């Protein structure tokens, strides 16, 4: 995490750490001054100015360190969120679909928040680490024996803490993995609430087998991991109480015992000063310093799990592997960017599913689309209609074959520019609350006119490109999405089952008014539909069957539809007669 912060803002981090160290050393100086002032022969008035100066140093350095780290933390979190969002928008759609929205949301929320919390703890860690270091120096000035005892105690405590913390770290990693599953179930709860309310058994099973199970795993791993940390901290803290007891009750007798030993037996003991009698002032200073150091040391140790969690979060962010699509910076030639023929030559796309023995392949697709043409795309579920739509709009890259617009081949170099030629309303569309990306605010008048035509003016108002509400029915929201696509005024339009949620009136308006209006403007329109009653309005009807594209006759399709309707009606009459 420190390396990550150094890359983002080196000098701010160093100044904050320096402020923390200065604050910690100032605190240690206050302990020395207090200990000196408690000596009977020392006049406290002579140390008053030094005490006041140390107080000012401690407070100003701590405030400076905290403010700098707060600003650094907010800057890093802002940059991290923006960078992640940019990576998500630049990553291939297929990669994002494979990762899943739950993992992306967990990184943008849980992991970034964990990083922010760890950064908030960093100045506190620096302050308390400086206090512990300064206390060790002060103890060494009082007596070399004190440094040896405290250093050994800290070494043993840190060793115990790290040994126990290894198991805690593994538990925290498992808790983080459970958090991804928990976010996925929360998403199911939010988007599947109607289905859950309609089916009690499904609702109970979802709550007990999915949501409660994942939450229980998250809780169990967190409780076990943090429990190990608590055990480690308190075991290290207990060593200091043992050290205090040893210094007060065992050290004098131990020194007397060593003083009575022959010099030949342990010649290094007198030279080390271990047999020197401790004065009451030294012993008082030792106990006061130990008591003052215990709380900062515990705080330092408590920072470790937070830094461990931040390391896990940072690693989860790094393992997203959101590599941007290569070379999305070129522009299409002016002739190709204008309304022109669109060609798909031998285009294929394969879905690889490890659970199935064979994978589904769309194509090879050979298709030409012309300006001012309305094309209907039909086919059963799983036939590849949505995949073909994603290939047409440039959201998927073909594995084989090529796409040409106005004779210009579409590659990774110009795919982004190619996408800007399309307006689409997918079946899983998302509706923003404003006309984002529209530079011309005069479109408000056009948008209001469209609202009237779509009979949404009594529900939605638009002011400076912002919709007054999105609290609409599914059909009304799709009409609003159609309005946005219509205002984009691009050469190609794609509608994926747009009319499926519309009543007969607006379904008829869509096929008999909106599509002809787009055609009259020279737009190329591709409509994925199952409304066979309107097939005769299309210039061409294309059918996908198991990944294979064929063109069907509109008149034949109309006849088949009528025959099917007659057969169904005759069957109904027979059933009623019987």
Image (cartoon, rainbow, N blue to C red):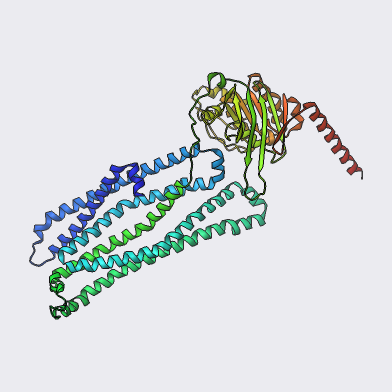
Residue in the foreground of this view, choosing between 29 and 526 = 526
Q: Position of residue 55 (x, y in %)?
A: 19, 53
Q: Residue at x 10, y 61 (%)?
A: 44
Would residue 222 be seen by someone viewing this image from the given angle? yes
Q: Position of residue 572 (x, y in %)?
A: 86, 41
Q: Position of residue 71 (x, y in %)?
A: 33, 43
Compared with 330, 136 (above or below) is below
Q: Residue at x 46, y 37 (%)?
A: 86
Q: Position of residue 324 (x, y in %)?
A: 48, 37
Compared with 140, 183 (above or below) is above
Compared with 346, 34 (above or below) is below
Examine the image and state in which quarter residue 30 appears.
Answer: bottom left
Examine the image and state in which quarter residue 214 appears.
Answer: bottom right
- Is residue 65 left or right of 380 when viewed as pictured? left
Q: Residue at x 59, y 24 (%)?
A: 405
Q: How many marks?
A: 0
Residue in the foreground of this view, choosing between 349 and 207 = 349
């Amino acid at each position: 995490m420190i390396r990550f912060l150094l890359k983002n803002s080196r000098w701010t981090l160093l100044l904050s750490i320096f402020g923390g160290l200065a604050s910690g050393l100032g605190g240690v100086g206050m302990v020395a001054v207090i200990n000196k002032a408690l000596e009977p022969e020392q006049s406290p008035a002579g140390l008053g100015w030094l005490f006041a100066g140390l107080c000012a140093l401690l407070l100003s350095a701590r405030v400076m360190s905290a403010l700098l780290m707060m600003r650094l933390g907010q800057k890093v979190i802002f940059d991290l969120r923006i960078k992640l969002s940019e990576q998500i928008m630049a990553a291939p759609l297929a990669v994002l679909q494979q990762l899943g929205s739950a993992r992306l949301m967990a990184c943008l929320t849980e992991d970034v928040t964990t990083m922010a919390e760890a950064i908030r703890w960093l100045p506190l860690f620096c302050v308390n680490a400086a206090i512990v270091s300064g206390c060790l120096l002060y103890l060494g000035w009082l007596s070399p024996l004190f440094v040896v005892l405290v250093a050994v105690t800290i070494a043993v405590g840190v060793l115990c803490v790290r040994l126990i913390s290894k198991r805690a770290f593994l538990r925290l990693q498992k808790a983080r993995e459970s958090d991804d599953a928990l976010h996925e179930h929360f998403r199911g709860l939010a988007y599947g609430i109607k289905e859950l309310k309609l089916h009690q058994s499904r609702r109970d099973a979802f709550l007990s087998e999915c949501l409660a199970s994942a939450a229980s795993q998250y809780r169990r791993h967190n409780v076990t991991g943090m429990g190990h940390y608590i055990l480690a901290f308190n075991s290290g803290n207990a060593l200091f109480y043992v050290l205090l007891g040893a210094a007060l009750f065992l050290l004098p007798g131990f020194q007397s015992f060593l003083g009575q030993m022959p010099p030949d037996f342990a010649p290094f003991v007198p030279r080390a000063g271990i047999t020197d009698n401790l004065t009451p002032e030294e012993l008082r200073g030792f106990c006061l310093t130990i008591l003052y150091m215990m709380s900062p040391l515990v705080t330092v140790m408590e920072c470790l799990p937070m830094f461990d969690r931040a390391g896990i979060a940072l690693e989860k962010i790094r393992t997203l592997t959101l590599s941007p699509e290569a070379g999305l910076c070129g522009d299409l030639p002016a002739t190709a960017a204008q309304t022109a023929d669109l060609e798909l030559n031998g285009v294929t796309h394969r879905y690889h599913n490890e659970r199935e023995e064979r994978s589904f392949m769309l194509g090879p697709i050979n298709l030409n689309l012309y300006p001012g043409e309305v094309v209907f795309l039909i086919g059963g579920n799983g036939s590849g209609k949505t995949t073909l739509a994603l290939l047409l709009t440039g959201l998927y890259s073909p594995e084989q074959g090529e796409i040409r617009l106005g004779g210009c081949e579409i590659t990774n170099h110009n795919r982004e520019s190619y996408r800007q030629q399309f307006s689409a309303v997918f079946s899983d569309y998302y509706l923003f609350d404003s006309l984002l990306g529209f530079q011309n605010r005069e479109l408000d008048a056009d948008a209001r006119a469209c609202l009237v035509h779509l009979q949404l003016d009594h529900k939605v108002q638009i002011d400076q490109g912002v919709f007054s509400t999105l609290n609409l029915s599914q059909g009304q929201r799709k009409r609003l999405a159609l309005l946005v696509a219509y205002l984009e005024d691009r050469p190609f339009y794609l509608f994926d089952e747009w009319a499926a949620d519309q009543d007969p009136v607006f379904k008829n308006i869509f096929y008999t008014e909106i599509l002809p209006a787009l055609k009259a403007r020279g737009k190329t329109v591709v409509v994925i539909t199952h409304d066979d009653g309107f097939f005769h309005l299309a210039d061409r009807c294309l059918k996908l069957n198991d990944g294979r594209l064929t063109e069907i006759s509109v008149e034949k399709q109309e006849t088949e539809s009528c025959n099917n309707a007659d057969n169904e009606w005759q069957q109904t009459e027979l059933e009623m007669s019987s």
